[in-house]
Structure formats: structure tokens, C-alpha cells
Image (spheres, rainbow, N blue to C red):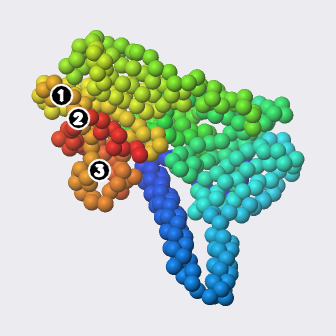
């Protein structure tokens, strides 16, 4: 049963959704930058006021007293007027049972801009669910028997405010214990044949057909399939019985891996060191037999094998190494090309200035496009969100240098 509180239709995350998502992300980043600038300006203002007080110390005691009183009043008014986000908690009573509980309600409201966060409670004030996202002026939820136990479960479509990821929160009453579901990412990764990270998949609720849909992006095409209860791991709400990060974390692990015996960039007997940080992030470092680092790959995927491609991109008869690197903090994927230039290993990166020329847009930033590898046509492409178009890039669009240009991105 669908809630009538908010008429939000969850659509499948195609290219238009990506464009809308990226625009929101840009606005969000711009506002944060403005807040930081205002903070700096506030500090500068304080310094100026302190300097002024020192240079006017000879002013009469009466004037100083009046000035101090005025400054204190202004300071109090300023604190009252600007206390960060204008957040007000709103309570909405739910007129139907949730998870077997009568008298439920939701509390929450506008967190910032048009982003809302709602928490569901039973009559005893115990949390039984959470829903959040953009433009949800009232909580959005659906009731359906998802796990097939004969009781309705609470389905909440959500969208995260930072990376704009689309997900579905699922809650159920398991013999009196309220449980929440988390996607079994390892099982899904094995099913689709590649790892999961924020940008390459969405979880959506199809209200019309009462299905939870998994959508993923394979580089150029969207694929989708319905998720079953077995695709999720259920754990008690508010407990530490399941934490996907703490469960996997066993400290940093580094192991030496020999992938094959074929020469790479002219090096015989090369090897890799794989470092797993325990939180789903894997680093692959490529070394010569003498222990000299000559290439790297990293990201949220590639736990078993590095995400690399070996191709002769410039037609000189010698293969280059294409490395896919995902920057978790920035949410960006960039491709790097390693080549052996007469015994000197150089790494090529795609500067934003070159991307602007390729897409004919002088104002484009890394928020406006992403890099992909088109496996079907063996080429690196740039997808421009502004015109929803893929542009092919060649090795000649990359800038090569010695050292580690991977540091230029993701900061």
C-alpha cells in the first residue's frame, strides 16, 4: 500500500537522473564553498574589529562603553539570526499500522535546501524506520509483504544528499524484533561479474509492480533485475549485530600477487602488491622484479584482480597499460595510461582543459563529466552530462609525465 503523503514517483535512474543528480551535487558543493567563504570573512571581520579597538583606545570611556554595548547587542542578534541550517522538527501522525504497531508517527523535516529526513517511531517512541531524500516534504513509504512471512514490511525509498545515491531502506518485524536490511554486495558483485561502488548502481522501488529493482551501469548501458529478500542481510535496528564495515575490517592487509608470467610494459617477472584497507577499498601496486613501482590501480572494485586493460593505443607495436582509478572521497573515476618510453615509465592523465576542448565547453569541470572505458569498442570515452553525449578520447589527448599524476585528482 502506498503512502498518500508525498506524490513522488520513483523513476529508473537513466541518464536524465544522472544529469539531475550531478546538478544537485554541483549546487551542494557551491553552497558549501560559500559557507566556507563566509566563515573566512567572519574571521577577517573579527580581526579588523580587534585592530580598530586597539587604535581607538584613547576614546572616552563613555564612547567605549556605548560601542561595547552596541557590539555585544549586534553579536547576540547575529547569533540569533544565523545559527546554521534553519531546521525545525515536525511530527506527522501515521493513520495506519506500521510493522504491526498502532499509533505510529514520523518526526523530521527540512535538513537543508530541499533535502528532508524522516524517522518513524511506534507509540512507545521506539525507532522502526527511516526515510530521507530530496523534495520529500512528508515521509514517503510503502507497505508490502516483501519477505513473504504474511506481515507487511516498511519500504522507504531514499536518496543520499552527498553522493546522490538512490537506495531503498527495508524494515520488518521479525517476531517482535525490528530489523533493517542491507544489500549483500558480495553476492550481487558475484552475480553481475563486477564490484559495486556508489556510482555504478542504484536500488529503486517499483511501486506499480511492488518490486525492488537493482540497476547498474556497465560503462555504456543500464542493466536491471528485481531483488529478492535473499539478496539482503537483515539485522536488528539500533544494534551492532551487523555492521558491514566493522564486520569486514581486520586492519590493513598487503599481499604479494603474481597475476601471470607475460611481460608488462617490457618488464619480465613483474608482480603486484594488493593492499585492502578493510572498508572495501583496494590498492594495486605494480613492481618490477627489482622492487621498482611502475604503475598503480585503486578503487572500491577490483578486490580479486586489478581493473586494467592492456592495449597498443598508439600503434607502435608496444602495449600500454590502462588503469581505472576511483577516488572515493571525490566520487570520481579517472583513467591513466602507463607506457614505456625508451626505458622510462611515463603515466598519462586526461587534463580537464583537454576535456573542455573535446566537448567544446570552456566552463566544464570534473563535476560535469565522467570518464569510462567502452569495452565493446575498446576505447576511452568521456560522458558529458550537459548534452548527454559520449566523446571518444585517444592517447594523444593525454598528458604524459614521469612521477605520479594520480595525485592530481580526487582531492
- Classify residue 251 as left or right of residue 271: right
Residue 151 is situated, as x and y percent measured from the top left of the image, at 79, 36
Q: Residue at x 32, y 22 (%)?
A: 286
Q: Earlier in the sequence, mark 1 or mark 2?
A: 1
Evaluate whether residue 58 shows in this view. Answer: yes
Residue under label 3, please give it. Answer: 352
Badge 3: residue crowd in 10 Å (few <14, some 14–19, many ≥20): some
Evaluate whether residue 208 shows in this view. Answer: no
- Classify residue 95 as left or right of residue 171: right
Q: Is 250 or 372 nearer to us in this picture?
A: 250
Residue 153 is situated, as x and y percent measured from the top left of the image, at 74, 39
Circle nearer the viewer, 3 or 2: 2
Q: Is 377 or 322 nearer to us in this picture?
A: 322
Q: Residue at x 33, y 51 (%)?
A: 384
Query: In the picture, residue 339 is in which quadrant?
Result: top left
Q: Is 319 or 200 nearer to us in this picture?
A: 319
Q: Residue at x 33, y 16 (%)?
A: 271
Q: Are marks 1 and 2 in contact (CB under 8 Å)?
A: yes
Q: CA distance from mark 3 to mark 1?
A: 25 Å
Residue under label 1, please give it. Answer: 344
Residue under label 2, please give it. Answer: 402
The image shows residue 227, relative to residue 57, as above or below, that is above
Q: Secondary structure at mark 3?
A: helix
Amino acid at each position: 500500500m502506498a503512502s498518500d503523503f508525498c506524490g513522488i514517483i520513483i523513476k529508473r535512474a537513466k541518464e536524465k537522473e544522472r544529469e539531475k543528480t550531478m546538478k544537485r551535487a554541483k549546487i551542494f558543493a557551491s553552497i558549501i564553498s560559500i559557507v566556507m567563504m563566509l566563515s573566512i570573512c567572519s574571521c577577517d571581520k573579527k580581526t579588523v574589529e580587534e585592530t580598530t579597538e586597539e587604535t581607538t583606545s584613547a576614546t572616552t570611556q563613555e564612547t567605549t562603553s556605548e560601542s561595547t554595548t552596541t557590539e555585544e547587542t549586534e553579536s547576540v542578534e547575529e547569533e540569533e539570526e544565523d545559527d546554521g541550517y534553519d531546521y525545525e522538527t515536525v511530527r506527522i501522525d501515521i493513520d495506519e499500522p506500521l510493522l504491526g504497531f498502532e499509533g505510529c508517527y514520523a518526526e523530521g523535516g527540512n535538513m537543508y535546501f530541499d533535502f528532508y529526513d524522516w524517522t518513524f517511531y511506534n507509540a512507545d517512541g521506539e525507532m522502526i524506520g527511516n526515510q530521507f531524500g530530496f523534495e520529500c516534504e512528508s515521509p514517503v513509504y510503502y507497505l508490502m509483504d516483501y519477505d513473504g512471512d504474511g506481515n507487511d514490511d516498511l519500504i522507504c525509498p531514499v536518496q543520499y544528499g552527498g553522493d546522490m545515491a538512490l537506495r531503498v531502506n527495508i524494515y520488518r518485524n521479525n517476531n517482535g524484533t525490528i530489523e533493517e536490511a542491507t544489500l549483500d554486495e558480495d553476492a550481487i558483485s558475484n552475480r553481475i561479474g563486477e564490484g559495486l561502488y556508489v556510482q555504478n548502481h542504484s536500488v529503486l522501488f517499483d511501486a506499480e509492480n511492488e518490486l525492488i529493482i537493482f540497476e547498474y551501469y556497465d560503462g555504456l548501458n543500464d542493466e536491471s533485475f528485481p531483488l529478492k529478500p535473499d539478496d539482503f542481510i537483515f539485522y536488528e535496528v539500533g544494534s551492532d549485530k551487523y555492521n558491514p564495515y566493522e564486520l569486514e575490517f581486520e586492519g590493513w592487509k598487503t599481499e604479494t600477487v603474481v597475476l601471470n608470467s607475460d611481460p608488462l610494459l617490457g618488464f619480465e617477472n613483474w608482480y603486484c602488491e594488493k593492499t585492502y584497507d578493510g572498508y572495501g577499498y583496494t590498492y594495486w601496486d605494480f613492481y618490477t622484479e627489482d622492487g621498482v613501482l611502475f604503475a598503480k590501480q585503486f578503487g572500491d572494485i577490483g578486490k580479486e584482480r586489478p581493473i586494467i586493460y592492456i592495449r597498443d593505443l598508439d600503434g607502435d607495436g608496444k602495449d600500454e597499460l590502462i588503469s581505472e582509478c576511483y577516488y572515493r572521497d571525490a566520487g570520481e573515476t579517472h583513467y591513466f595510461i602507463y607506457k614505456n618510453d625508451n626505458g622510462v615509465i611515463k603515466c598519462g592523465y586526461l587534463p580537464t582543459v583537454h576535456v573542455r576542448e573535446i566537448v567544446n565547453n570552456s566552463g566544464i569541470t570534473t563535476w560535469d563529466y565522467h570518464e569510462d572505458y567502452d569495452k565493446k569498442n575498446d576505447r576511452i570515452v568521456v560522458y558529458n552530462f550537459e548534452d548527454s553525449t559520449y566523446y571518444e578520447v585517444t592517447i594523444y589527448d593525454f598528458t604524459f609525465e614521469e612521477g605520479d599524476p594520480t595525485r592530481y585528482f580526487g582531492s
